[in-house]
Image (tube, rainbow, N blue to C red):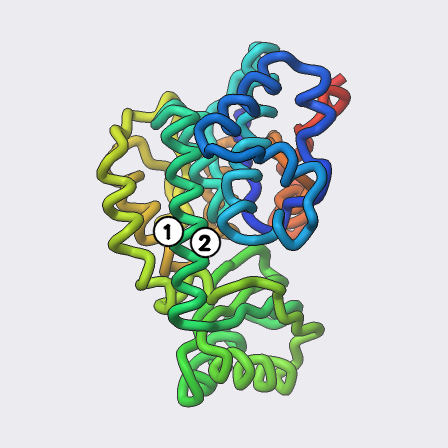
């Protein structure tokens, strides 16, 4: 029997104007956005819709903005009675997946992602780093490049996004060395990412204790459906394991390819990308074309 997974985007999916159509046409989504403004103590909608773009792309704003838009779209899906069998989110999107599965409330999730964004931003200031997308290089060659480049500085694989796209992260010296070696080994393209820190790398350890305290202050319930975790790439229903996964996720790679392969092995043939953009739909095309993904952000998306 065909199964459906909800997929929630992470950083990189944001754009000015996201969520505006939904807020203007759906009372439940607007109510959630108003709750976000009240919870955060500032006008998140103004940042999402009017920017400036540098303000929206600041990590401490991007994370609550993307989380809120995903939950606004989720509210709309719930009202339509849309069922689902599994949930997964890319990096930040894992918080959206957990909220959608009923693990914690919208307000608690919003406070957590705001804290996460602030801590990751401070970690980037305390230990500056860089990230780069490596396109079209086999995984074994990339691992060879990382091993060699590590002599120049910390550099690790941060995101296994698709078989042809792996993101690396670490100290600038290590990332620069890895970029050069990857190009020499035949990478089709090497793209330095416009980010404020070395996410999913040991340089994020600065943020661990602060996030641990934030997570411990929130009650985690068992999810209504299994959530496929970034760190383990398997379906999980244990609240403590899910909480632990969010902490490890700070400095561990996002195993998106394996997560989506696991979803397929569980019988998933349909996915809904809930929130801003179509990034995850594009990544899944590179992993398997047997899972059809539909982006869901605006009312007309499922008309």
In percent of width and height, residue 100 lies at: 46, 26
Task: Estimate how packed mark 2 is, as few (under 14), some (14 to 19) or many (20 or more) residues with alpha carbons within 10 Å.
Answer: many
Q: Are marks 2 and 1 in contact (CB under 8 Å)?
A: yes
**What quarter of the picture does the C terminus occupy?**
top right
In percent of width and height, residue 260 lies at: 52, 44
SS for dot 1? loop
Task: Estimate how packed mark 1 is, as few (under 14), some (14 to 19) or many (20 or more) residues with alpha carbons within 10 Å.
Answer: many
In percent of width and height, residue 16 lies at: 71, 42
State the CA–CA distance, disc 2 to disc 1. 6 Å
SS for dot 2? loop
> How many labels sit on residues?
2
Residue 215: quadrant of the picture? top left
Answer left or right for 27 relative to 210: right
Whether residue 29 appears in this view of the structure is yes
Residue 271: quadrant of the picture? top right
Residue drawn at the location 57% of the way across and 15% of the way down: 82
Answer left or right for 109 relative to 194: left
Residue drawn at the location 61% of the way across and 11% of the way down: 80
Residue 182, above or below 12: below
In percent of width and height, residue 134 lies at: 61, 70
Front position in the image: 217 or 145: 217
Whether residue 2 appears in this view of the structure is no
Answer left or right for 109 relative to 294: left
Front position in the image: 43 or 81: 43
Residue drawn at the location 44% of the way across and 28% of the way down: 39
Residue 179, above or below 58: below
* Label annotation for residue 182: none
Find disc 1 in the rendering and name its residue.
Answer: 231
Residue drawn at the location 47% of the way across and 48% of the way down: 91
Find disc 2 in the rendering and name its residue.
Answer: 255
Mark positioned earlier in the residue sequence (2 or 1): 1
């Amino acid at each position: 029997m065909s199964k459906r997974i909800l997929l929630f985007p992470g950083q990189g999916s944001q754009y000015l104007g996201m969520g505006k159509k939904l807020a203007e046409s759906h009372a439940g989504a607007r109510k959630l956005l108003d709750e976000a403004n009240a919870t955060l103590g500032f006008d998140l909608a103004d940042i999402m819709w009017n920017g400036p773009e540098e303000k929206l792309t600041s990590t401490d704003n991007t994370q609550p903005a993307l989380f809120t838009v995903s939950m606004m779209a989720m509210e709309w899906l719930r009202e339509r009675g849309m069922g689902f069998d599994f949930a997964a989110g890319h990096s930040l999107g894992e918080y959206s997946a957990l909220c959608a599965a009923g693990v914690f409330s919208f307000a608690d999730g919003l406070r957590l992602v705001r804290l996460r964004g602030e801590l990751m931003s401070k970690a980037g200031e305390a230990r500056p780093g860089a990230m780069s997308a490596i396109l079209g290089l086999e995984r074994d060659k990339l691992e060879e490049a990382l091993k060699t480049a590590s002599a120049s500085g910390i550099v690790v694989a941060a995101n296994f996004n698709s078989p042809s796209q792996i993101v690396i992260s670490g100290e600038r010296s290590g990332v620069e060395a890895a970029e050069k070696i990857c190009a020499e080994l035949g990478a089709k393209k090497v793209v330095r990412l416009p980010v404020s820190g070395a996410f999913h790398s040991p340089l994020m350890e600065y943020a661990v204790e602060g996030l641990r305290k934030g997570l411990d202050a929130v009650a985690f319930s068992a999810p209504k459906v299994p959530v496929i975790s970034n760190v383990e790439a398997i379906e999980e229903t244990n609240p403590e394991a899910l909480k632990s996964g969010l902490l490890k996720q700070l400095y561990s790679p996002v195993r998106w390819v394996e997560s989506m392969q696991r979803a397929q092995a569980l019988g998933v043939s349909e996915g809904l990308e809930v929130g801003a953009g179509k990034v995850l739909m594009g990544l899944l095309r590179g992993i398997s074309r047997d899972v059809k993904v539909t982006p869901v952000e605006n009312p007309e998306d499922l008309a």
